Amino acid sequence: MSGILKFLKQRWLPIVCVLVVLGTLPTAWIFSNKWNAEILKTAEDDAGDKLNKIKRARVTYVIPSVVPGQQDTTISDSPNAAMTAWVADQRQQRVEQAGLVMADATKRNKAKHGPLVQGLYPEGPGNDSQLKRQMREYLELMTGDARAGKPSWYTRTLREAGAGTVPNAAELGQLIAEQKDREEAIASAESEDGRVDAERQKQIDESLVSRRIGEYRRHAQGFSFYADESVLGGHNLFPTPSMEARDGAQVPSHEEGFMWMADAWVLEDILGAIGAANTGVGGERTEVELSPVKRIVKLEIDKLPLFGARKGDPGGLISRDGRAPLDPNASITGRVSSSENSVYDVRNVRLELVVSSEKLPSVIEAFHSTGLMTVTDLDLTEIDVWDDLSQGYAYGNEHVVKASMSIEIVWLRSWTVPLMPKTVQQILGVNNNG
């Protein structure tokens, strides 16, 4: 026993430490279990709260519309990978659809428009003498050459579109005079005194009127509507047939030539719409008496708007969703050319037509369907058909009116800018549009 006591006395401190540790273990185990339970419950409560928040969370998916005026598609749902992937696919499809729509619109808007002289636009030859020579050829193309019997580009384009003119007054007058002489000679020979009495003269005069009207109507069977280069009066940019300008040094500038070409495109658009209106159900071109559009009385074109370095526009322009700004005071569409509009240019045309009143809706529809054209104003007035007939215009038996129209043509810059010389881009403010 004394040996054990001696051992304990010599090592009392380690033994006490061991006993303390052994005594602490049960206590620590008891408190540890209690703490673990509390921590676990707290963690579970926090995780459950966060899980509930996730379950209650809603995400608004947006599929943008590609059609102006149409609302975007919105879907509110809990976030999940399947929905996110589906929306992403739908958005990509919309982008591709928008690209196809834009390509189709550009193709339709451009139609057959292009340089009237190959190699002259957009920049033309770098050599000044070659450029001047091509511009002189361009001038001759536009004005024609009366000495060589070459019609102007305008006259030729009108004819190709189905336009015709009234009969030659001198030639028709000669025919009527010859018939008058023949009928009066017959009447005189049949008369006892060799004179033509009043009753017979009245009959002769009526037959001459019928002959004249018949010639007018027969002549009108050879084309679709009346028009010649004189209807282009009042314009500012069309070149005049000047022999001096062609033969002398007055060659148009490259920029002026582009403005001519831009107006020529306007004429092509207008004639394309009239051609569509005057096309029968079988695809054939109608003659005047059956045509909805019977005559172009006048065609005027506003100049291309020039902005140059000027930035900003007068008040009134409204831009929504990043689209081209609109001016509600400009027209019923609000579309305008502006220094802030990099998408399109607007060409405004004033057009006076003689049309069939019954077929007027089809005429308006033709402008809407053949290009990016809108009839923004329309006034109708009666015309004196007998007065027009006396001038050679035979409209047939349909009731006709004079339709004074304002027409808005939109040209997408996606096709016009690549045809513009750099100098024209600058004066049109293209550079300012980015």
Image: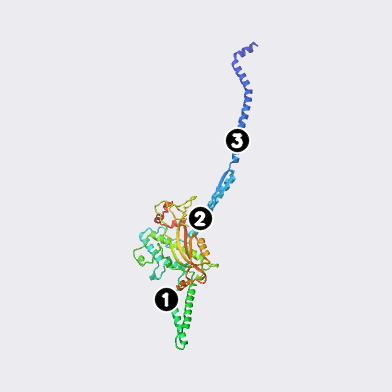
Whole-percent x, y for residue 333 in the image: 49, 56
N-terminal of the pair, mark 1 or mark 2, is: 2
Q: Amino acid at mark 2?
A: Met
Q: Amino acid at mark 1?
A: Ala
148 or 223, nearer to the observer: 223
**Element marked by disc 1:** helix
Within the image, what quadrant is residue 194 found in?
A: bottom left
Whole-percent x, y for residue 222 in the image: 49, 72
Whole-percent x, y for residue 123 in the image: 40, 57
- 312 relative to 248, above or below: above
Residue at the image position 36 percent from the left and 65 percent from the top: 245
Within the image, what quadrant is residue 193 found in?
A: bottom left
309 or 254, nearer to the observer: 309
Horizontal side of residue 154 vs 362, given as left or right = left
- 298 relative to 185, above or below: above
248 or 126, nearer to the observer: 248
Callout 2 crowding tier (Cα within 10 Å): few <14, some 14–19, many ≥20 = some
N-terminal of the pair, mark 3 or mark 1, is: 3
In the picture, the quarter occupied by the N terminus is: top right
Residue at the image position 61 percent from the left and 28 percent from the top: 35
- Labels 2 & 3 near each other (Cβ < 8 A): no
Identify the residue under disc 2. Answer: 102
